[in-house]
Amino acid sequence: MKLLDVLFCDDIRVEMNNKVSLMGLYNDRIVFRSSEKTKLEWPIKMDLAMLVRLNISDNEKKPISFAFECFSKNKSIVKIDGNTDISNFDGSVFCLILSTKNIDLNPGDLGYSIKVRDEKTEYLSQTNKKAIQVLLQKT
């Protein structure tokens, strides 16, 4: 099993025919704009969604659970865990769609940790401490 990527966006929707639509996709940074009229104070509350894409080959066991965590400045800001439903999985790329509400974002690097396992074995454990930057831009 291999982690392909983790994509950060505002919202994720599952459309007809299992199409996935990403709303407000972020590249390498989340930029908040501030001016004299709209002064922002940290932390900023924000909804954030993540699409986690995993490559699972035919000969690998299928995962039954996962644990995902986002952290900023070595402090956990989101923890999501649960079971995976892969009963209808028929491809090589498996997606986890994760959604958060009202998390506190501060300036700096936003990182994540992902763990995928079955009853006995952890198949994947990966951490990226600098997945995306959170910045304030004055206008």
Image (cartoon, helix red, strand yellow):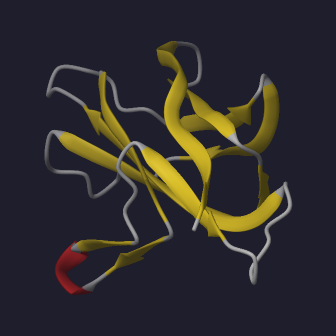
The residue lying toward the viewer, choosing from 132 and 63, is 132
Residue depicted at x 17% and y 20%: 59
Q: Quadrant of residue 43?
A: bottom right
Quarter of the image where the N terminus is located: top left
Picture mark count: 0
Q: Is residue 79 above or below residue 89?
A: above
Residue 114 left/right relative to 9 = right
* Residue 69, visible in the rendered structure: no
Residue depicted at x 68% and y 73%: 35
Residue depicted at x 60% and y 63%: 32
* Residue 78, visible in the rendered structure: yes
> Residue 113, position in %: x, y?
59, 26
> Residue 72, position in %: x, y?
73, 33
The residue lying toward the viewer, choosing from 113 and 67, is 113
> Residue 64, position in %: x, y?
50, 37
Residue depicted at x 28% and y 83%: 15
Quarter of the image where the C terminus is located: bottom right
Q: Is residue 21 above or below residue 62?
A: below
Residue 37 left/right relative to 7 = right
> Residue 86, position in %: x, y?
36, 50
Residue 90 left/right relative to 72 = left
Q: Is residue 134 above or below residue 58?
A: below
